[in-house]
Image (cartoon, helix red, strand yellow):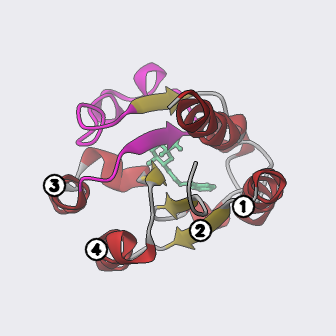
Amino acid sequence: MSGETHILVLHGPNLNLLGTREPGHYGRHTLAAIDAGLQAQAAAWGWQVESVQSNAEHVLIDAIHRAPDTGCQYIIINPAAFTHTSVALRDALAAVQIPFIEVHLSNIHAREPFRHHSYFSDLAMGVISGLGADGYLLALQAIHRRLESA
Ligand SMILES: O=C(O)[C@]1(O)C[C@H](CCCOc2ccccc2)[C@@H](O)[C@H](O)C1
């Protein structure tokens, strides 16, 4: 693996509330704790992980547009409610052509029907849904395994 591996982690709207409300659906881990876990694993591998959380669609889109300029090789994204609504965010990921893993804390397929459709899953390298905060680390590990086997 030549050069440092750079991963962009994107968290969509309301995920800043993690750990404070709705533990039944989203667990008790705060977003800061999730990001700290990713940073710790990344540091062990000598990787760089950049995390962006925003309640604004355009901020997430702008982060995706910047990703190629930062040498980002993979994206891990929890689009949150934008999962079910945002063609714009989908189009940004399709435009930069950086492989991404879609992560959801809850199992969106076991919830309300409106959560069963994702504008991202058919473009994703893979989807992890329902494994809580572990899903993010599992996504990072899947990227590591892919890079190790390349
Ligand atoms: O399960 C997931 O990770 C979701 O992406 C979370 C979104 C909601 C993120 C809001 O997170 C909160 C956390 C704590 C309190 C309130 C909302 C939801 O709209 C998706 O259908 C599934």
The earlier-in-sequence mark between 1 and 3 is 1
- Expressed as whole percent of the image width and height from the top left, the position of residue 24 reads 70, 36
Disc 2 target residue? 51
> In the rendered structure, which amino acid carries the disc numbered 4?
His
Q: Is 148 situated left or right of 88 in this image? A: right
Disc 4 target residue? 65
Callouts 2 and 3 close, C-beta under 8 Å? no
> In the rendered structure, which amino acid carries the disc numbered 2?
Ser
Disc 1 target residue? 35
Disc 3 target residue? 87
For the residue carrying disc 4, how many other residues have a C-alpha within 10 Å: few (<14), some (14-19), or many (20+)? some
Give the residue at x 33% y 37%: 124
> In the rendered structure, which amino acid carries the disc numbered 1?
Asp
Q: Nearer the viewer, mark 3 or mark 4?
A: 4
Callouts 1 and 2 close, C-beta under 8 Å? yes
Give the residue at x 79% y 50%: 41
Q: Please, what is the dominant secondary structure of the magenta stretch?
A: loop
For the residue carrying disc 1, how many other residues have a C-alpha within 10 Å: few (<14), some (14-19), or many (20+)? some
Q: Residues under labels 1 and 4: Cα distance?
A: 21 Å
Q: Is 98 situated left or right of 38 in this image? A: left
